[in-house]
Amino acid sequence: MKLGYFTMPLHPPGSDITKTLDDDLEQIITLDNLGYSEAWIGEHFTAEWENIPSPDLFIAKAIGFTKNIILGTGVTCMPNHNPFMLAHRIAQLDHMAHGRFHWGIGSGGFPGDFEVFGFDPKTGEHRDMSKDSLDLILQLWDNPKPGLYKHKYWEFTVPEPDESISLRFHMKPFQQPHPPIGVAGVSHKSDTLIMAGERGYIPMSISIVPTPVLTSHWESVEEGARKADRKANRSEWRIARIVYVAETTKQARAEALNGVLARDFRDYFIPLILMSRMGELVKTDPNMADSELTPEYLLDNVWVVGSPKDVANQLRHIYEEVGGFGVLLVNGHEWQPKENFVKSMTLLKQEVMPMLSDLV
């Protein structure tokens, strides 16, 4: 099992954007130095808590400050972009990264972003548009036929080549036929993860759901793989979790409940989950009242918090309960206080992961 990172990122409203971007970059550099295998960066336009609207720009800078860590968009929200422009940006980024890049894609999920770009999530049109956009980008990279490309949400023309001035669609990715594509699943029996299995994409499961939902995610991947006569590979499956490690479990739990983890959920994630009517995904008991969805509940039922030994045992339990997975993605938060989070990330890599070396 490999170790990676998934960051939205998360910063309280009113934070200094310049400083948070610098801090987020410093996190990635630290993780690269510790030997984390990959990091995925989110995209949000109207979420003040999640204040990176252009993960590709962030990744372009981070590539120059890191040596080994693979960086990915987590995710590019396809309805937010013109596919012709996106095909060029992602292909160029892949070249700038010399292939040290994964392309995470999705259909979006933040209410304000849907409003900005004119999508009603109740209709599901954003999902259809995302698939259409992805298929078109893959076509442009493979065989960019000249002509008019017209859709409800975009229109552009691929010009006829002109050899006299070398005019043509020419920007293709560094990795052929394209960078590894990752898709994130949220809901029980996720349609997105069915597509991942069908197309052989990297399946990713979000951090806030308990293990029964995770189990359904892999069932979706396998369902899609069967449709395409593929064999699903569990080593490709990424599972994101809230993970925090300290020298003792008592210390870890206290720091989690009295620090940024509890703050981020109490002040942002829990209200967002309830507003988005996703509470049932997070609850282990469907009869739970919304008021019972607290940081304390999440600590006991979803988060992975404790001493190195206890965290290793919790991760092994998740691994065995879901049937195995390939990469643990630690969910990103502000590293405040910095020394505690650097210690947590170090203990996870250097003490916890060796205890799980038999999990492949």
Image (tube, rainbow, N blue to C red):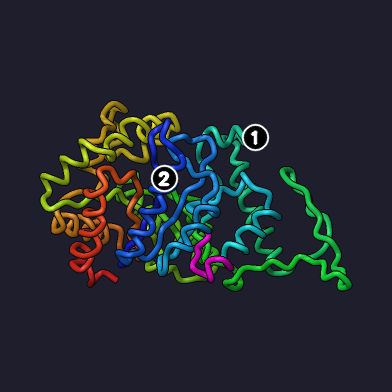
Q: Which residue is mark 2?
A: 9
Q: Residue at coordinates 23% horizontally, 59% vertically from top-left? A: 346
Measuring from the top left, give residue 340's x and y in whole percent: 22, 48
Q: Quadrant of the C terminus?
A: bottom left
Q: Nearer the viewer, residue 168 or 198?
A: 168
Type of amino acid at the residue the image marks with label 2: Pro
Give 85 or 285, whichever is nearer the viewer.
85
Q: Is residue 74 visible?
A: yes
Q: Disc 2 versus disc 1: distance between alpha carbons?
A: 24 Å
**Can you give x and y, in whole percent of width and height, for residue 256 in the image?**
21, 41
The residue positioned 23% from the left and 71% from the top of the image is 357
Residue sitting at x 43%, y 29%: 275
- State the count of labels: 2
Quarter of the rendering containing residue 281: top left
Q: Secondary structure at mark 1?
A: loop
The local crowd at label 2, few if under 14, some if 14 to 19, many if 20 or more residues have their Cα within 10 Å, is many
Q: Which of disc 1 and disc 2 is earlier in sequence?
A: 2
Residue 284 relative to residue 55: left or right: left
Q: Which residues are magenta?
A: 95-103
Say which mark, if any, is on residue 118: 1
- Amino acid residing under circle 1: Gly
Q: Is residue 106 above or below residue 300?
A: below
For the point 39% across and 58% down, the residue is 218
Does the magenta portion include 148? no
